[in-house]
Amino acid sequence: MQPGRKVLVMGATGRLGVAVARALAHRGDRAILTARNGPRLEALSVELSRPELPAVPFVCADLLDDAAPEIIFDGIRRTVGKVDDVVIACGPFPRTPFETLRRDDLRQTLAVHAIAPLLLVHALAEDLASARGAVVALTDAGVTRPYTNHVAYLTAKGALQTGLRALAVELAPEVRVNMVSLGIVADPEADADPLRMHRLATRSPLGRFGTAEEVVHVVLALLDSTWATGEIWGVGR
């Protein structure tokens, strides 16, 4: 795809969302940012803005709010009118040991990782179709290779994968819908225990964690891959 497209980035203040937004700006696309942390959104907007261009727009919304898809949709209409593509990089990763699993754990993770993103894509379907656009979502390799203590999160990511594969059929041929199934991506701030780091890294055939930059490379490739839809590209698994 040619640069200069308007791309909504959901989860724009998380590590991967920030990296995606920066890469889009670097290549000449216009990112529209949304997340729940207003000060971080504003700071990222300022960072990505250029004197010769309008300020990078952002919409603050908490996906736990049932009205979040409508809030984001209305914010898009007020700031840029329409979008061409969507990147779903929602990042909360709650630890939910099975023995303490509650209904609210499932409800909240499903709302953030599956329900709100699917409803927002539904709301933006006409925009995406008129732009021959793409949806790219970050999911988790744990959906098919589960690990412990994250039942709610993995359930929600599985629902997102299934929902988006269905949308790939519903929205074809005008809109492409693809996913990136991630292994473990390094977090320099959180991953301070070398023994734990080594143990987790051995789960990957490559023997190491991925980086945000490597994830961004695949996201951009899927945005640009005009003959791919309904795909789940595994990286670092």
Image (tube, rainbow, N blue to C red):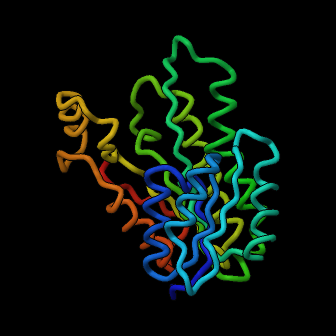
* Relative horizontal placement of residue 19, taking residue 79 as reference (left or right): left
Image position, residue 36 (x, y; %): 65, 46
What's the residue at 70%, 69% (across, down)? 171
Residue 180, can we see it?
yes
What's the residue at 69%, 53% (across, down)? 60
* Relative horizontal placement of residue 62, taking residue 11 as reference (left or right): right
* Relative horizontal placement of residue 130, taking residue 202 as reference (left or right): right
User: Which residue occupies the foreground of this view, 143 or 152?
Assistant: 152
What's the residue at 55%, 12% (across, down)? 100
Image position, residue 131 (x, y; %): 68, 82
Looking at the image, the residue that sits furthest to the front is: 51
Image position, residue 96 (x, y; %): 52, 22
What's the residue at 59%, 66% (across, down)? 135
Count of marks placed on residues: 0
Residue 161, can we see it?
no
User: Which residue occupies the foreground of this view, 213 or 127?
Assistant: 213
Image position, residue 151 (x, y; %): 52, 27
Picture layout, residue 236 above or below residue 51: above
User: Which residue occupies the foreground of this view, 168 or 213?
Assistant: 213
